[in-house]
Image (cartoon, grey):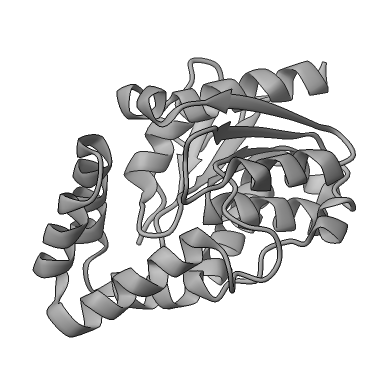
Amino acid sequence: MPQHQPSPPTRNAGERVIVALPGTGSDADFAARAFANADLRVVAVDPDGDGLISGYRRALDDAASRWGTIVAAGVSLGACVAVQWAIDNPQRCAGVLAALPPWVGDPATAPAAHSALLTLDLLRRRGLDETISQMQAGSPRWLAAELSRSWRAIGDQLEPVLAEASSYHAPTAETISQLRVPLAITAATDDPVHPHAVAQVWRTHAPIATLADITLAELGEDPSILGRRALDGWRSLDS
């Protein structure tokens, strides 16, 4: 799937670009809204069922080659990939905006990975329509609407995306301690799928980091709160 670029890719001197990676089962549409702001260009990336993680990393590489130093951003799984890429490419990254970090290291006991596996199992057994119907029955209205739209948009690639995401080994605390650029985190205090304790581990071990707290109700009202709070934190660290 193509990247979503709100404006032509002509680089201006000193321009900062945010490359936004969506979470599991989400897409560029949500990532673009989550990190929307008035000052920086946002390039949002769609998931690729032929290689979810490699596709995200390739999008970050391509953006850095095109625009120079970039801000790597992501929601949930996308935040994990953004952090790891920033560790591997410190000279090409100006900072990381991490929304709703899902887990640290091994996904075996992570609620977000477990949720992806349950969704994958239902998808394989009952198909997309029934999977969406059951998800809607147990989700807040705003989340049900978001996932219904993105799951249908991802279509046939949803199954391999869920499979790869659920087994992804996220950066460990030790790995996060190697991050050399500012890390600005936004986390929900009442999200059982993305435990606030995970965000606290990320903040504690990153050498330069901030953590902004929100609630799921605030997120449901305005997805851009994810990026706005993280961007405020990054600016406070980057000044």
User: Is residue 230 left or right of 174 when viewed as pictured?
Assistant: left
Q: Where is residue 172 in the image (x, y as percent from the top left)?
A: 77, 62
- When asked about the image quadrant of residue 152, the answer is bottom left
Identify the residue at image location x=45%, y=50%: 22
**Picture layout, residue 237 above or below residue 24:** above
Identify the residue at image location x=66%, y=44%: 197
**Picture layout, residue 11 above or below residue 51:** above
Q: Relative to the observer, which residue lies in front, 68 or 155?
A: 155
Q: Relative to the observer, which residue lies in front, 85 or 166?
A: 166
Q: Where is residue 189 in the image (x, y as percent from the top left)?
A: 54, 32
- When asked about the image quadrant of residue 231, the answer is top right
Q: Name the image quarter holding the N terminus.
A: bottom left
User: Is residue 5 left or right of 204 when viewed as pictured?
Assistant: left
Q: Where is residue 161 in the image (x, y as percent from the top left)?
A: 40, 71
Identify the residue at image location x=69%, y=59%: 104
User: Is residue 29 left or right of 237 when viewed as pictured?
Assistant: left
User: Is residue 19 left or right of 114 when viewed as pictured?
Assistant: right
Q: Can residue 6 be seen in this view?
A: no
